[in-house]
Amino acid sequence: MKKDIKAAIFLLMISMFAFSGGAFAQDNDDAEVGNTAKGPKYGTDSVKCVMHFSLYREFYKQNNIKDAYPHWKWVLNNCPLISQNVYIDGAKMVSTRIDECKDPVKRNLMIDTLMMVYDQRITYFDREGYVLGRKGVDLYTYQPEKTEQIYQILKKSIELSGNKSDGSSLVYYFRSIIGMVDLQKLEKASIVDGYDQISQIIDFNIKLNQQNAKKLASWENIKGNIESTFEPFATCPDLISIYEKKFTEKPNDVELLKKITNILERKDCVKSDLFFQATENLHKLEPSAQSAYLMGTLNVKKENYGKAIEYVQQAANLFEDNADKIKALELLANINFNQRNYSQARSSALKILQINPSYGKAYILIGDLYAASSSMCADDDLGGKTVFWAAIDKYQKARSVDSSVEAEANSKIAQYAKHYPASGDLFFRDLIEGNSYTVGCWINETTTIRGSK
């Protein structure tokens, strides 16, 4: 009874305001000017429009959908431009009525109404990508058998929204792709392509929301959902089988090559020949620091060290970010180290120190290079033992500039100090501990004479 009285008073106030020629008439005129292509904001009867809109909103706020619904429907049909809330609220009200309806015929009619609400919202208020996402998710929820329609709606939504796609839209889009494959309306490769497309959007949003714990957790959950759905299709043999034929047909298709390398790397199928060939072709067509670095690592695994050095050097030159440049130079130094190209390895380590003088690992690496040179620098009349003086200088420098390598540096100092020349050997060669000494060979560094006790 109280609600009825309240509604009656509210209706009387709205009517009095409307007929008093209040400010809203001016708003209506402005709306008509601004929306001539779509119609006047308050329809052809502004008084009734404001009255029904106000009544539906009042009932809706009270969660009285039964009384709100007829007023809302009038607004939808007669003044669809009055507010975007008509469509936001309307979708919720129609969804509630669908959930409560037991009659399958009426229920289907209400689902049609819900779809119409989304279409009309796009017509009058745009945001097509986002609204199609909501439409597709609701259609999947209420009529999952309409696989092809759902797929088309969500496909367009994600094409329009890109990285701004809603998480639930991505989840249901992926399920609709699998459904289309089950109906034999798409090839199995579409599942992999869809996974790749969706994963890139998810990864973008995970990176974007690193400082927002709530959103980050939500996107991580969406990622887990997609991963578990994709799992049955994720075996390396399946992925390679799907893409080998495509690669053979279009070995120079950049977009295809990106898909192949992305998906195979994501699913850890990088040991395959297909991954190597696709990465190599992509680097030739669209060379980048990242592809050069990747080709370097792949050639290391194949023990093609000459090629690996060539590619990693390219990467070091192309990378702009210092951390990436250091990563490439460090790999280059280690490849040369393993190939006993000690001078070239040191050159890369010194370039690292030019970028970051406090990068202790670079000093550790140079020390290791010196220590490894003992057998090839034996012309010092001490059997190559002088290289350990120079090596330990580098380990000491490493721990002085970078506390993170202190334990490793101390361990190496203790290890190689045992190989110092005996004090007696120094005496017979007129070498005095504490004096300077230039280590020759390829090292050519001045160090301090030290002997073992």
Image: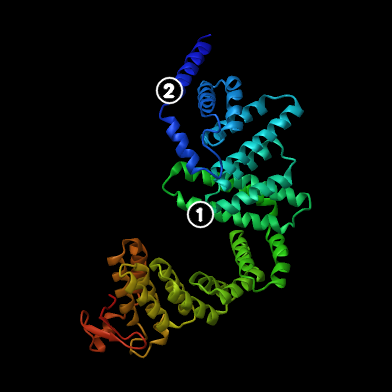
Measured as percent of width and height from the top left, residue 349 is found at 38, 75
Q: Quadrant of residue 355?
A: bottom left
Decide if residue 420 is in sight here. no
For badge 2, the amino acid type reads Ser
Q: Secondary structure at mark 2?
A: loop
Q: Is residue 250 above or below residue 27?
A: below
Side of 38 where 194 appears, left or right? right
Side of 138 where 86 appears, left or right? left
Report, in whole angstroms, how far the alpha carbon at label 1 lies from the one at label 2: 54 Å
Q: Nearer the viewer, residue 344 or 91?
A: 91
Measured as percent of width and height from the top left, residue 94 is found at 63, 29
Q: Which mark is residue 20?
A: 2
Q: Nearer the viewer, residue 390 or 343?
A: 343
Answer with mark 1 or mark 2, whichever residue precedes in sequence.
2
Query: How busy is the neighbourhood of tag 2: few (under 14 within 10 Å), some, or many (20 plus)?
Result: few
Instruction: Please identify, in this view, whether the residue under mark 1 or under mark 2 is nearer the observer.
Output: 2
Query: How busy is the neighbourhood of tag 1: few (under 14 within 10 Å), some, or many (20 plus)?
Result: some
Measured as percent of width and height from the top left, residue 147 is found at 73, 45
Q: Which mark is residue 204?
A: 1
Q: Quadrant of residue 418?
A: bottom left
Task: Name the colouring of the figure.
Answer: rainbow
Q: Is residue 122 above or below residue 349?
A: above
Q: Nearer the viewer, residue 276 or 68?
A: 68
For badge 1, the amino acid type reads Phe
Most extreme residue toward the top is 1
Q: Is residue 219 above or below residue 23?
A: below
